[in-house]
Amino acid sequence: MRTIFLAVSLVLSASAFAQEHQHQHDLDAHLAALREHLAANTTVTSTLPKWAVVPAAARTFDIVARSFNFTVTPSPFVVNQGDVVTLRVSVPANDPGTHGILMLTYVETPLSVSPGQTRSVTFTANSSGTFQFICSNSGCGTGHFDMFGEMFVNAVTIAAPTVTSIAPASGSTAGGTNVTLTGTGFAAGATVTIGGVSATNVQVTSSTTITATTPAHAAGAVSIVVTNPDGQSGTLANGFTYALPGPTIASISPITGSTSGNTFVTISGTNFQTGATVTIGGIAATNVNVVNATTITAMTPLGPINDQLGGKDVVVTNPDTNKATLAGAFNYLRPVLALTLVTPSAALPAGGTKIAISGAGFSTTAPTTVTIGGVAATNVQVVDAVTLTATAPPHAAGPVDVVVTSGGTSVTIKGALAYLTKMPKHRAAKH
Ligand SMILES: [Cu+2]
């Protein structure tokens, strides 16, 4: 008895399973047929990339399903790409059938609604085109296949990104500058090139802001290009300038030299560029030679005449105007008073000839006097560390000595000036 009951029970449950299985199979076949029908009546014209789907508007449509049609309110059933669409589907209480909605892309799982019931489904319309929907309930009766309608999704054009600014707008040729790009239409996954080289650490902070790190690049102005995942790009022409790093000075050797200048010095440092200039104590050095990026040779300029000799700044200025200063690095030494030349070498016996005396060790700190043929010259001026000027006094014809005295020291050039008995040739022509 017990055995028979079990057997019957097994047969029964196996039979129920078979029926259920058959029923499910019929439903699947029916849905497949509906989907096939819908596919022939669905046209997708474009699909926005996921990043570009920005909820544009919330749209709600009331759909009344009855035997055997759909009524959509408001009408027409049109939305824009990006809209968030809610369908409220109801079946009148007195309708004889249970209906439902199936729509490819947007309502792939049948939404079944019983008489007197309202059910909703919400989706984002990221694909444009024409989407037919149909009653998903095959058992609603004759006329079931006449229950369909259409939803239209207008295509939305995705604008290309624009780049309006970059900050900072310049950085080292070595790269590594963290920059912020400002613009419009930046999409997640956008890439950035600067001077044609990919930037690193690109972060699309928002549709209007991207942060990135500059790559290494040769000096000069370069363009910034932002490219969205859809291939559209925006360019800021010559928006970023790669600058060579500024120079630095480590040392100057020797650190002392004569106020007469022309001390050969070697300046060591970094990032010296061809064409760099050098000043010492604010005065241009001469014979500047940029040996390489770390070495410059030059001749010192004249030192001061006021005996403020120590701690002159050494400055290297690159052609791009970047400069480096080694403060108080060079010290001048005033050499022993010396004379080398008097020009012109001739004067009029009446006096009044302005002469220049070249030498070394001239300064303004001690009184400087000049005698010419034993007579004091007037208007003695220390022009610089190696030049004096004075006015020759009247004197009888003949060669005379020029003597300069300063700080208790006297130096003589014998026969440096000749007083002439005859008028110089160019004056003899005058009548
Ligand atoms: Cu139906």
Image (tube, rainbow, N blue to C red):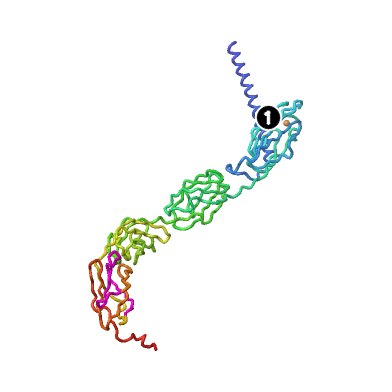
Q: Is residue 313 left or right of residue 13?
A: left
Q: Nearer the viewer, residue 366 or 2?
A: 366
Q: Tag 1's secondary structure?
A: strand
In magenta segment, residue 252:
no
- The answer to which quarter of the image holds residue 381 is bottom left
**Residue 184, percent from left and from top:** 57, 48
**Residue 8, percent from left and from top:** 62, 16
The outermost residue toward the top is 1
Q: Residues within 10 Å of mark 1 (few under 14, many from 20)?
A: some
Q: How many marks?
A: 1
Stretch in magenta: 351-377
Q: Give the position of the N terminus as an image quadrant.
A: top right
**Residue 294, percent from left and from top:** 34, 58
The answer to whether residue 159 is visible is yes
Task: Indicate if the residue with disc 1 has its beta carbon within 8 Å of ligand 1.
Answer: no
Q: Nearer the viewer, residue 125 or 421?
A: 421
**Residue of label 1:** 119
Above or below residue 374? Residue 426 is below
Give the residue displayed 41% in from the left and 61% down from the top.
319
The answer to whether residue 40 is visible is no
In magenta segment, residue 373:
yes
The quadrant where ligand 1 appears is: top right
- The answer to which quarter of the image holds residue 128 is top right
Give the residue displayed 49% in from the left and 53% down from the top.
169
Above or below residue 396? Residue 77 is above
**Residue 304, percent from left and from top:** 32, 63
